[in-house]
Amino acid sequence: MKCKEICDLLDEYILGELDPESEIQINEHLSECQSCKDELCEKEATVTAIKKVTRFDPSAEVLKRIRRSLPRQGKGQPFLWLFPKRFIYALAAFLFGIVLMRSVDILIFEQKEAPQAEIKFETRHQEPFVDTVEFYHAPAKNVAKI
């Protein structure tokens, strides 16, 4: 392997994440190349220093200033901000699309209401109940001559 390939794999080598073949090749290269060996020493020192770092606990005054600078949730915020902003934007775009489509329908097709047929309701003449049947006869002028 070349030095550039070795330097790219040194992080995995330090963390022990390489397969055995690659690790053997790196060991052989490091035994021959001083510049790669120096690079390995620098990276190992960095990893060791990072592992030794303890957790940073800020003072009480710094914590108070940080808390004051953070945005507060509660009564001051509108209800919609409880949802992700992407959801609110998508909802607004959806509603805008519906309004736009409906207005285009009205403008292009000029939808008018269909004319309503006029329906008249007439009440039947209420005649008293008669127990007889009336027969109708045709006027004489319409009767065929025999």
Image (cartoon, helix red, strand yellow):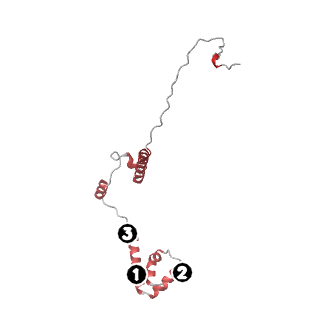
Residue found at the very far right of the displayed protein = 146
Pointer 2 local density, CA inside 10 Å: few below 14, some 14–19, many at least 20:
few
Q: Residue furthest front?
A: 146
- From the viewer's perspective, is 18 left or right of 77? right
Mark number, residue 21: 2
Residue picked out by circle 1? 39
Q: Height in image: 118 above or below 26? A: above
- Give the Cα separation between the discs numbered 1 and 2: 21 Å
Provide residue 63's location: percent of width, then percent of height: 31, 57
State how far apart marks 1 and 3 are (Cα).
22 Å
- Tag 2 or tag 3, which sits nearer the N-term? 2
Return the x and y of residue 140 as percentages of the image width and height. Answer: 64, 16
- Residue extending farthest bottom: 32
Q: Which residue is mark 3?
A: 53
Tell which of 130 and 55 is nearer to you. 130
Instruction: Answer above or below: position of 118 versus 134.
Output: below
Earlier sequence position, callout 1 versus callout 2 = 2
Disc 2 secondary structure class: helix
Tell me which amino acid carries mark 3.
Val
